[in-house]
Image (cartoon, helix red, strand yellow):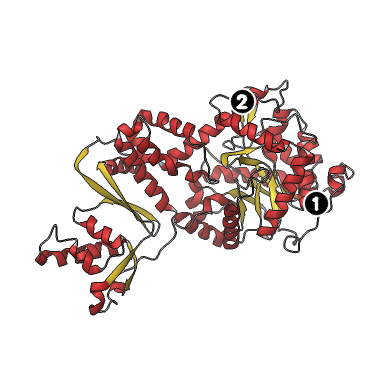
Amino acid sequence: MIDPAGLVSHASPAYLSDKTIAMTPATSSQPLPYLGYGLGLRVDHYEALLANPGNVEWLEVVSENYMVDGGLPLVWLDRFRERFPLVMHGVSLSIGSTDPLDEDYLARLAALAKRVEPAWVSDHLCWTGVQGINLHDLMPLPYTEEALDHVVSRVLRVQDTLKRRILLENVSSYVSFADSQLTEWEFLAAVAERADCLILLDVNNVHVSAQNHGFSSLDYLRGIPASRVQQFHLAGFEQGEHLIIDTHDAPVSNAVWDLYIEAVRRFGRVSTMIERDDNFPPLFELMAELDHARTLAEPLLQDAA
Amino acid sequence: MSSLQTIQEQMLQAVLAERAAKLRSIRSDDIAGAEDRLSIYHHGYRVRLRDALKNEFTGLQCMAGRRFHALLDTYVKAHPSEHYNIRWYGADLPSFLDETQPWCDEPQLAEMAYVDWAVSTAFDAEDERSMGMADLSAVPAHAWANLRLSMQKHLRVLTVTHNVDAFRRAADSGAKRPHLRRFVHARRILVWRKETTIHYRTLDRDEWPVLNAALGGETFAAMCERLADHHDESTAMSRMVQLLQRWLETGLIQGWTTD
């Protein structure tokens, strides 16, 4: 790590220190590996990626796409598993929902993790539905003590079921709540510390939310404990009339590259990935973006070393 | 009720409502008002569900043409998603079209949707072993009369009164939209997966009663009897062998038992 001492700018605030976490042996685990530079695996790139993996060192698969009974998705998954280190990234855990955790979902997620043996499993710090209805969106939470207690207890449950620590990703958001008592980064840091989980920091999402809510993206980075950051996402967005829309369907913007440099300075060597969810370009374009990430990060990391 | 629960339920209702509302729990600021902010989730919800349906119902899109979006909108409005995986959102669309005005006045739409959904569910259904000719040759001669076949569990047979398979084929190949034809007699379309490839075809007129008997767990002797309506004794057995060969070659049979 480049600057571990300066990473946590807050001196043990109340929301971190007033709870004692009793980690179970099942989830207290070894440090997770550093994987290098990777891509989100998408159907459009299946064949090209197997034919020529190029500079892609690891892949992130969307868990739900493979939580199926059989058929082609699992055939492809097994092929990639033979060739690349994999991590699993879910969109439907709904860790912040006030509905009960979906036991069927958890069982299928656990079964998939057993099959894939991923380097890690991640999802989002959000809720996706309530009252049994799924909005299929990453809905932001109010950053309150009540929501914090709720999320922490559920992360502990999930980690116990999966028998591993999970990563939670910060989401892009368009609304904030009058009830919020904490900043988003205080809330994310507190969840990670209290539940002993890790953080998937989406640099694009930090930028999008900072622009949409008028906070400093650098303050955000300063508020995240470095020891918790296990993975970066890099992605693109669309500029709306008043708000930035997180589309993940465009190249990484200059503003996000700049923020990535700050993130590397702050968090050091972190497994980094380009995440494209739509408007898929030819694979070589994503590989070029990966090379750009490498070009930006490696000199900083070598200087620090 | 906790304030977290209240906020989530209010936000859910605001997203599901026909028009994006303003919620007091959401902040407005100089960048954007609460209503504009919420409208992004409101709009995104409908786009995502429609996109999921477009992926699964390509034959229906080909058949409905310009009315496809209106059809999807009525379904999205009537059916919130209840499954964690958006891939399953379309499960009720075929029955919705079967029962809801004005779509139920055109039964070909529901027929097409049932075929599309059968294709979709076969795609990632559980892997099953396909039995080959060599497996069946192990059946002792005396046991044939009481032989029962186990067909692939994901296999679906759908009754249609229109040439819906032509629309699905056009959608799959990018060919020109075919003309709709109504059949004098209903036909049956078989949808199944062999290894990782999805297949669909119209069953021969004499094939359906036999396949239905096989699916119902009836004996080989009973299956042969089902050919009596279409064949005399001299041709029934050769036709039965022909059907068995076809089913084996195309991976429809996963096993057999004898009493």
Residue B33 visible in rendering? yes
Disc 2 sits on a residue from what chain? Answer: A
Report the number of numbered marks: 2
Residue position for label 2: A240
Dividing the picture into quarters, in which one does residue B112 lie? top left
Q: Of all residues shown, which one is farthest toward the front?
A: B1
Distance in Å between CA atoms under marks 1 and 2: 36 Å
In this rendering, would A138 be left or right of B88? right
Residue at 64% x, 49% y is A101
Dividing the picture into quarters, in which one does residue B229 lie? bottom left
Where residue A210 appears, as percent x and y from the top left, is 73, 32
In this rendering, would A30 be left or right of A247? right
Where residue B11 appears, as percent x and y from the top left, is 63, 32
Q: Amino acid at mark 2?
A: Gly
Category of crowding for the residue at label 1, using alpha-carbon neighbours closer than 10 angstroms: few (below 14), some (14–19), many (at least 20): some
Category of crowding for the residue at label 2, using alpha-carbon neighbours closer than 10 angstroms: few (below 14), some (14–19), many (at least 20): few
Q: Are marks 1 and 2 on the same chain?
A: yes
Disc 1 sits on a residue from what chain? Answer: A
First in residue order: circle 1 vs circle 2: 1
Q: Quick one: A7 or B46, which is closer to the camera?
A: B46
Task: Give the label on residue A1, or none.
Answer: 1
Q: Of all residues shown, which one is farthest toward the right?
A: A11
Task: Give the label on residue B17, or none.
Answer: none
Residue at 37% x, 36% y is B99
Where disc 2 sits, the SS reads loop
Discs 1/2, front = 2
Where residue B109 appears, as percent x and y from the top left, is 33, 37
